[in-house]
Amino acid sequence: MSRFLRSIRAGLYTLMILNILDREGVSYGYRLMVRIREASGWTLNPSESTVYETLKNLEEQGLVRSFWGEGVKHPRKFYEITDEGRKVLSQLNREVRSIVGALQRFLGVGC
Amino acid sequence: MSRFLRSIRAGLYTLMILNILDREGVSYGYRLMVRIREASGWTLNPSESTVYETLKNLEEQGLVRSFWGEGVKHPRKFYEITDEGRKVLSQLNREVRSIVGALQRFLGVGC
DNA sequence: ATACAATACCTCGGAGTACGAGGTATCGAT
DNA sequence: ATCGATACCTCGTACTCCGAGGTATTGTAT
């Protein structure tokens, strides 16, 4: 059961992270995990390792950039979205809207 | 880019197949592939192998049952949803509605 | 003072999914 | 007779999620 939900949620973390970085500016792993939970009304509930893994992938793709926070007591690795990231994000949002629309029609959700 | 979309669509095939079998009764692999494309307005576009793989998994889980069509010239393996499948489906639909709702709010889609 | 929860970072391995490539066979139309 | 559509399948690659495990700091309650 939960295996199906797991895979349905798959990929949405990438979407959420890019959107949050785009809207709210610089952030960091742990904070992003909390923000995804909040922003989704606890419908999405990523584990720490998922978020860190996703950020690593995004950085490898050049869609986010990271730097270690200076003057911060608690060691923190900050991330910000790149121009390339913004480009990919807008395309991604368009496609996800289309998927959400299709599901809405199919399942009869909303409105 | 498409890797993100791929994983966002991941799992939705299971959802679509169970729903289509529930609503339209007995069907078969190739037909289900076509119906998913139609029902999603071509937003979802699963490959044959994906559909066959998904059906195999669903059968292993006991959520669908299969039988070879008799009196059919072209060899066809039919599938139908089981009681257990229906149980899982209603739970799945509930959860997906919640995810769709969250995305709608987050992305500002629809209404 | 000290214990503990929360914050913050990370790796590894297992389980699951999508799908392209490749293979086989039948049916219907040109 | 040939070809495209229909119909089935397996295999390997790439990818994602996340539990388990590890480390260290900060703030709070006792």
Image (cartoon, coloured by chain):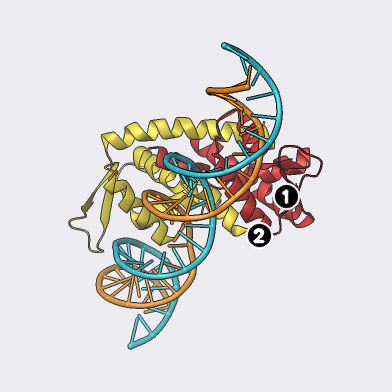
Chain colours: A red, B yellow, C orange, D cyan
Mark 2 and mark 1 in contact? Answer it, CB < 8 Å.
Answer: no
Name the residue type under label 1.
Answer: Ser
Label 2 in the same subunit as label 1 = yes
Neighbourhood count class around disc 1 (C-alpha, 10 Å): few under 14, some 14–19, many 20 upward: few
Q: Is residue B50 visible?
A: yes
Compared to residue A56, the image places residue A108 above or below, namely above
The residue at the point 73 percent across, 43 percent down is A21
Chain that bears disc 1: A
In the image, taking residue A34 as reference, residue B63 lies left or right, namely left
Q: Secondary structure beneath disc 2?
A: helix
- Residue lying farthest to the left in this orientation: B70
The amino acid type, in three-letter code, at marker 2 is: Glu
Which image quarter: residue A46?
top right
Residue drawn at (66%, 59%), measured in percent from left and top?
Answer: A60
- Does residue D3 sit above or below B40 in this rendering? below
Vertical relation: A37 (above or below) D12? above
Q: Which residue is mark 1?
A: A90
Q: As drawn, is A21 to the left or to the right of B94?
A: right
Task: Choose the circle earlier in sequence order: 2 or 1.
Answer: 2
Which quadrant of the figure contains the N terminus of chain B?
bottom right
Q: Measuring from the top left, give residue A16's x and y in whole percent.
A: 65, 41
Q: Residues within 10 Å of mark 2 (few under 14, many from 20)?
A: few
- Which mark identifies residue A40? none
- Residue B52 placement (x, y as % from top left): 35, 57
Residue at mark 2: chain: A
Label 1: which secondary element: helix
Q: Residue A73 location in percent, x, y?
A: 75, 37
- Of residue B56 and residue D3, the one placed in the foreground of this image is B56
Can residue B41 be seen in the rendering of this structure? no
**Which is nearer the eye, A10 or B44?**
A10
Mark drawn on residue A60: 2
Left or right: A20 in relation to B57: right
